[in-house]
Image (cartoon, helix red, strand yellow):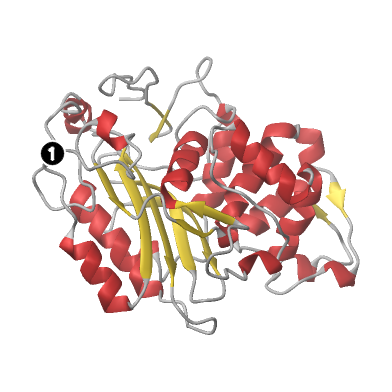
Amino acid sequence: MDRWRLRLGHRSDRLATVDGLSHHPRGGPVKDRRPTRAPEPTRRTVLRLGLAAAPVAAAAGGLLTSSPAAARTVSGRPPQAGAVVDSAVLELERTHDVTLGLSATNLATGVRLAHRPDERFAILSVFKTLLAAAVLDRADEKRLRHRVWYPPADVVVNSPVTAEHIDTGITIAELCDAALRYSDNTAANLLLREIGGPRGLTAYARSIGDRVTRLDRWEPELNAAVPGDVRDTTTAAAVARSFENLLVGRALRPADRRRLTGWMLANTTSAARFRAGLPGGWKLADKTGAGDYGTNNDAGVAWNPAGEPIVIVALTRRNRVDAPKVDAALADAARLVAQRLG
C-alpha cells in the first residue's frame, strides 16, 4: 500500500505514508525520494488504527493510554482512569541513578507512555533538529548550496566536520548534515547565525506550536545544565510534539521533511542510546545530546516493522556537575517503549 489515510480518533489531521514512512499529506503526490526507506505499513497496521478509541490500557505505563485524546492530554493533569505509574520506569531511574523525563506515543494507535513529561530538562544538542528545520523552512536550494567561510577561532569543542573544512568552507546543507549526523557544535553555531541566533531558534519553536522550548546561549555554553536554570531547556512532551510536527506532520514542506528525516536516519551518535535498545527491523531518525550534571538525551521518531511511527523522547539528568552520562538509561527507555507501544 503506497499511501494510506485514516482518521485517528477525533483528530482532524491525518497520517499518510510516503516512501514507507508515515507522514501527514501536504499538497499532491511526492516525487522526490529519501535516501533510506522504512518498512511499508501492513494491513494489520491499517486495521489497528480503528482501535484508536479503545479504553485506557490496563497494562502498566508511566501514563499508558490508548486514546489519541488521552495521548494529547497535558500529563500534569490527573491521569485518566486505569493509567498507572509504570514500575519499570521507576526501576529504570533507580537502576541508573538518573532523573528521567519520558514521552512516547505510537501515532498509529494513540497509545502513550509518559513519565515526568512536563518537567524541564536541558535540551542540549537535541535543539539541532529544530535548528536544521528552521534553516530548511526559510532557505531555498540556492541558499542551501551557499558556501560558508569561518576562521579557526570560530571552531569550538566537538566539531569533527567543521574542523576539517576551515580552508575549503562548507555549504549550508553540509552544515545541517554535520550538526545532525555528527552533532558538530561549530556547524550549529554557524547555522544559528542564519536564523537570528538562539532567539531565532526559540521563535521558530513558537511558530510550530512549541510554547515551552527555549534556547538562550550558543554552543558549548548551552550544555551547562545547571539545576534550576531555565535557560536552554525544554520538556519531553514539548520535544515529542515538535518532533511529531517536523518528522511526521506538516510543519515542513514534504521535500524538507524528507531531507530532515534522511539526515536523522543517518545519525552516528545514537549507537549506545536508543539504537541499542530498539529491536531489529526498526528504523530510527533521532538526535542525541549530552552536557554537565550527567545530562544525556535522545529524541526521535522510530518506525516499527509494521511501519507505525512512534515518537520517543527521553531526557535525563543526575545530581553532580561531573557525573558521567548513562547511555544505558536511554537504551533501556527505548527498549521499554518498544515493548509497551511497538
- Quadrant where the N terminus lies? top left
Left-right relation of 239 to 330? right
**Residue at the farthest top position:** 28
Indicate the secondary structure of the residue bearing disc 1: loop
Query: Which residue bears the numbered disc 1?
Result: 81
Of 155 and 9, which appears nearest the observer?
9
Q: Residue at x 20, y 28 (%)?
A: 52
Query: Could you say which quadrant of the image residue 72 lies in?
Result: top left
Q: Quadrant of residue 203?
A: top right
Specify whether residue 158 is in view: yes
- Relative image position of residue 215 (x, y in whole percent): 65, 52
Q: Nearer the viewer, residue 92 or 245?
A: 92
Provide residue 119's location: percent of width, then percent of height: 42, 55
In this view, the residue in front, 139 or 38, is: 139
Q: Is residue 342 visible?
A: no
Residue 335 located left or right of residue 50: right
Is disc 1 surrounded by few (<14), some (14 to 19) or many (20+) residues within 10 Å? few
Q: Residue at x 61, y 57 (%)?
A: 232
Dot 1 amino acid type: Ala
Which residue lies at the image location 32% right of the left edge and 43% below the top edge? 75
Residue 276: percent from the left, percent from the top? 35, 67
- The residue under the point 78% across, 70% down is 164
Along the horizontal axis of the image, is 79 left or right of 151?
left
